Amino acid sequence: MSDNPDGDMELAPPDFEKTWLDRALETTGKAFAWAIFAAFLISVFEVISRYVFDSPTYWAHETTTFLIAAVFLIGGPVALAGNKHIRVRMVYDAVGPKGRKILDIFNCVVAMLFFAGLGYAGAIMAWKATHTPTGEIHFEGTGTSWNPPTPALLKIIILFCVIVMFVQSALHLIQVLRRDTREQRQSPGE
């Protein structure tokens, strides 16, 4: 947090500059946020259909769940793009520019290792959700009377988001490695 009198939180370190991918993700993240409004409208439609017209739908719950889950998953790359992940700033703020650079490099490398492992697991999970044991394409369904392929689609989204976060972390690592630590940038509020 910054020490400014307005009490505003400093969300990004002063050395953080957004990459082209970060800017693109923040823009598309805003568009995907409308899926929450669509889920709200579907829920309202379901409540009116069920309780006013005594005609419940069989698709509303699964559609709403899929939309909210998809937005939640897309939130990972969007949060990384805005550098808005939760972090412990006590050590980071106590060290100088060279120490921050070392911590940022460590953070990027650990994140890339994590995303690589998660991507491997996500690829296996997505493959199993989209293919039969014999290798034929068949999307996993929910098992309900409607049986949409939303579980398979969500697993594909998981894999896509993990790959995007790996690339983001690599771009951030390149950015950190290029950072000049000879001069201290002043953050707003210092």
Image (cartoon, rainbow, N blue to C red):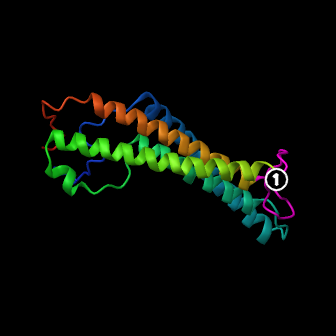
> What residue is at 12 percent from the left and 30 percent from the top?
183
Q: What residue appears at the point 82 percent right and 67 percent down from the top-left corner?
A: 56
Q: How many marks?
A: 1
Predominant SS along the magenta part:
loop
Residue 65 position by quadrant: bottom right
Q: Quadrant of the C terminus?
A: top left
- Circle 1: is it few (<14), some (14-19), or many (20+) Cα within 10 Å? few
Write the start and end of the magenta stretch as one range: 134-149
Q: Does residue 22 sit above or below 66 in this rendering?
A: above
Where is residue 5? Give x, y as percent. 15, 52
- Looking at the image, which residue sits at the far front? 134
Q: Nearer the viewer, residue 43 or 175?
A: 175
Residue 75 in the image, given as x and y percentages of width and height: 51, 49
Q: Quadrant of residue 97?
A: top left
On the rendered structure, is 7 left or right of 105?
A: left
- Identity of the residue drawn at 29% across and 32% down: 177
Q: Is residue 14 visible?
A: yes
Question: Residue beneath label 1, please?
Answer: 133
Residue 58's spot in the image, x, y percent?
Answer: 82, 63
Front residue of 124 and 88: 124
**Is residue 35 toward the left or the right of residue 109 in the image?**
right
Image coords of residue 13 (percent x, y): 26, 43
The answer to whether any part of residue 3 appears in the image is: no
Q: Assess whether residue 28 is covered by the magenta stretch.
A: no
The amino acid marked with disc number 1 is Pro
Task: Relative to 90, say whether 14 is above or below.
Answer: above
**Residue 57 versus residue 118 in the image, above or below:** below
**Residue that protrudes farthest toward the right in the picture:** 145
In terms of secondary structure, where does tag 1 sit?
A: loop
- Pick whichever, 12 or 97, lies toward us: 97
Q: Residue at x 55, y 54 (%)?
A: 72
